[in-house]
Amino acid sequence: MDFISKMAASKMGQLRAELVELNEQLSRATTEESRKRLKQTILEKETYYNILADRIRIHSSF
């Protein structure tokens, strides 16, 4: 695994942990505004996670 793939994998692990915490917060959210904000943050982090996964797939295919 090259340097870029290692860094992406490391960041993906961090994002997974953040997503777990955000989903827990979402389950405890009491206002619609906080739920909306958490859902947006989760969507952004999931998108970033998927971009990193694609980057690993691309680099490992070379």
Image (tube, rainbow, N blue to C red):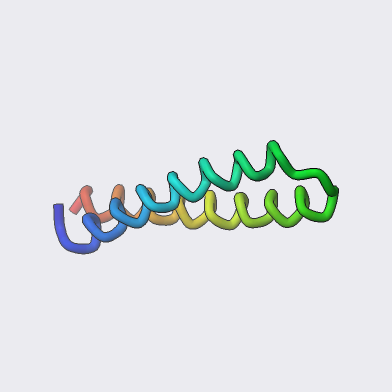
In this view of the protein, which residue sits in the foreground, 38 or 45?
A: 38
In the rendered structure, the answer to whether residue 18 lies left or right of residue 22 reads: left
* x, y percent for residue 12: 37, 51
In the drawing, does residue 60 fall left or right of residue 47? Answer: left
Q: Residue at x 63, y 56 (%)?
A: 41
- Measured from the top left, where is residue 38 in percent x and y? 68, 52
Say which of 56 and 21 sits in front.
Answer: 21
Depth check, front residue: 26 or 48: 26
As drawn, is 35 to the left or to the right of 1?
right
Image quarter of residue 11: bottom left
Where, quadrant-wise, is the C terminus in this rendering? bottom left
Q: Position of residue 46 (x, y in %)?
A: 53, 49
Using residue 39 as the reference point, say whether residue 56 is left or right of it: left
Q: Residue at coordinates 51% horizontally, 41% vertically from top-left?
A: 20
- The count of marks equals 0
User: Extreme left residue here?
Assistant: 1
Q: Residue at x 52, y 46 (%)?
A: 19
Q: Is 27 located above or below residue 10 in the figure? A: above
Towards the viewer: 49 or 39: 39
Q: Position of residue 53 (x, y in %)?
A: 37, 49
